[in-house]
Image (cartoon, helix red, strand yellow):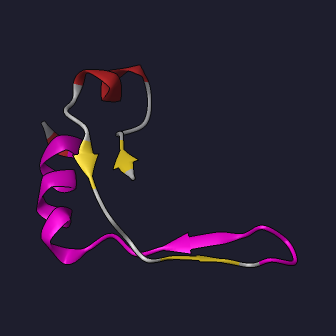
Amino acid sequence: MTFHLPGYEGLDKPTVWIFPEVVVCLDCGLAELTVPEAELPTLAKGATA
């Protein structure tokens, strides 16, 4: 799974590859995931750059 920062500005930022465990509710379709701790600094750096 890849993660992009929101907005058109996020398209210029590099893609962050994450491989989370995804939990999906089969009744309503709600999906939750947890970003691995090792990827959080990369996302934070992209958000503030």
Q: Is 33 rendered above or below residue 4?
A: below
Q: Could you tell me which residue is drawn at 22 percent across and 29 percent down?
A: 13
Instruction: Locate residue 34, reporting x and y percent.
Output: 40, 75
- The reply, left or right, for residue 1 in relation to residue 44 is right
Q: Could you tell me which residue is drawn at 22 percent across and 53 percent down?
A: 43
Q: Which of 36 and 19 is in front in this view?
A: 19
- The reply, left or right, for residue 5 in relation to residue 40 is right
Magenta segment includes 1: no
- Which residues are the magenta region? 26-47
Q: Is 44 rendered above or below residue 19?
A: above
Instruction: Locate residue 6, reporting x and y percent.
Output: 43, 36
Instruction: Locate residue 41, reporting x and y percent.
Output: 12, 61
Q: Which residue lies furthest to the right in this view?
A: 27
Q: Could you tell me which residue is drawn at 87 percent across and 78 percent down?
A: 27
- The reply, left or right, for residue 23 in relation to residue 45 is right
Magenta segment includes 27: yes
Q: Nearer the viewer, residue 46 or 29?
A: 29
**Quadrant of res 39:** bottom left
Q: Is 1 rendered above or below residue 36?
A: above
Q: Which of 11 and 45 is in front in this view?
A: 11
Quadrant holding the C terminus = top left
